[in-house]
Image (cartoon, rainbow, N blue to C red):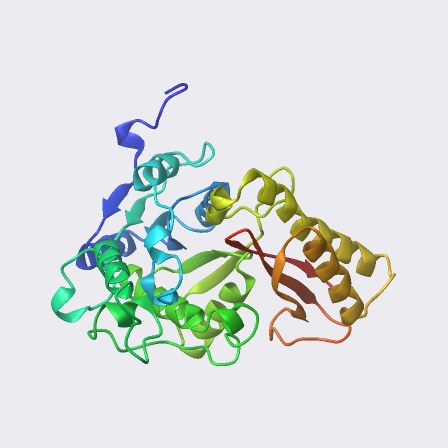
Amino acid sequence: MEGGSAAPEELPEIITNKDEMRKWSRAMRCRGKTIALVPTMGYLHQGHLSLVEKAQSLADVVVVSIYVNPGQFSPSEDLSTYPSDFHGDILKLGSVSGCRRVDAVFHPHNLYDYGNIGRKGERDIVEELSEEREKGPPASGVSSCVEEMGAGHETWVKVERLERGLCGKSRPVFFRGVATVVTKLFNIVDPDMAVFGKKDYQQWRVIQRMVRDLDFGIRIVGSDITREQDGLAMSSRNVRLSPGDRGKALSISRSLFQAKSLVERGQTTNCSDLRGTLVQAISGAGGKIDYVEIVDQESLETLGEVDRPVVICIAAWFGNVRLIDNIEISG
């Protein structure tokens, strides 16, 4: 179909029920098919589609989950305003860069138990709670949107050490929420492998460690960062950048590539010097630094020298948008 949307027969099967998703996966296994899962929160861009293409190269069938996970947001974060375009997402997944369509989309109503309010949609609950929050602060001890919504869910998965640093410092409930919802998705979809983007480097490593420690029989694949033509790492949050802030945000990727070049040319291996150069470049462009860290690629421990494979990880605010990016250096 030239110049138009994907034809209906090209669209993936949409599954919203957990039991139906399990039945679908079991049926695929009975046919001898291998299954790859690509977990997303929707509002798909080319970075997500590159993960799908990677999954298609590794497995017989591909499931993309679209679910904005409230367990990884604190009550003060942007769950209720997270961008969404489910219809557009489905059209994109109907034809991935000319490859075969995605086989199934798992789009659950919710994945948590909220007790007596569990029949409402999660976004509806969030909107109601936002109104309640204006009347006064939430109850003490609330640490995520799930816990603020209701008392039904109380089981969490934590990867104790890997989640402490980097994004875990400023977002203390984030990785607990990610590990928990990914565990749920693995239990429901039962994939042979799952593909995660390396832009969320700490998330990828946390999931790898969780799978190892809990003996999931699932291969975790990391896919390289997809960038815009000007170098900005693709993100669903990029649409919220003003034109001016978007231009300034290029200081993140440019400084990362510069730092990698300095190391590879042998000009410096001192992490303190590299960090200073990165901070100066991003702050000078108007960014507010959350963190700039040079860490071991597997342990994520902060280093003093680039004497092994490292990853430089950055999180910075431009306007009201928090961006993350990273670059691996072989050492």
User: Would you place residue 316 above or below residue 176 in this image?
Assistant: above
Percent of width and height locating residue 177: 38, 69
Percent of width and height locating residue 170: 51, 70
The C terminus sits in image quarter? bottom right
For the point 79% across and 54% down, the residue is 261
**Quadrant of the rendered structure where residue 94 is?**
top left
For the point 40% across and 69% down, the residue is 179
Residue 133 shown left or right of residue 72 in the figure? left
User: Would you place residue 15 above or below residue 91 in this image?
Assistant: below
User: Can residue 54 be seen in the rendering of this structure?
Assistant: no
For the point 73% across and 63% down, the residue is 330
User: Can residue 245 be seen in the rendering of this structure?
Assistant: yes
**Quadrant of the rendered structure where residue 122 is?**
bottom left
Q: Residue furthest front?
A: 135
Q: Nearer the viewer, residue 139 or 78?
A: 139
Q: Nearer the viewer, residue 210 or 259?
A: 259
